[in-house]
Image (cartoon, rainbow, N blue to C red):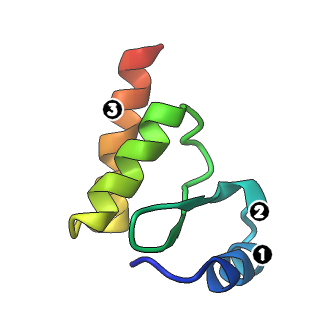
Amino acid sequence: MPESKRDALKRAKKEGFPPSSVQEGKDGWFIIPHDIIDPKAQRAYIHCRENGGTASTCAAVAHVLQNKED
């Protein structure tokens, strides 16, 4: 679910994510999972979440895209 940048940064810190994992989408901010480092995979994760995907489903989609890039 998108949230404000401030809230996302606060939650990221609480959950052990670096501030750089907070990325902007069209409707708010998202915390990108730790191991999704490819920019295309990060955008895919955000796009998936914005379209109603769950965090785990979107992470799986992003991992598949990232692994294809390698």
Left or right: residue 28 versus residue 59 is: right
Residue 10: name its quadrant: bottom right
In what element is the residue under mark 1? helix
- Label 3 sits on a secondary structure element that is helix
The answer to which of 8 and 60 lies nearer the viewer is: 8
Q: Is residue 22 above or below residue 35?
A: below
The residue depicted at 58 percent of the width and 58 percent of the height is 23
Please tell me in which quadrant of the rendered image residue 35 appears.
top right
Mark 1 Cα shell of 10 Å, populated few (<14), some (14-19), many (≥20): few
Q: Mark 1 points at which residue?
A: 13
Image quarter for residue 36? top right
Give the mark, 3 or 1, whose residue is nearer the N terminus. Answer: 1
Sequence-wise, the earlier of marks 1 and 2 is 1
**Mark 3 residue type:** Val
Gap in angstroms between the C-alphas marked 1 and 2: 7 Å
The image's mark for residue 64 is 3
Of the residues shown, which amino acid type is indicated by label 2? Pro
Disc 1 and disc 2 in contact, CB within 8 angstroms: yes
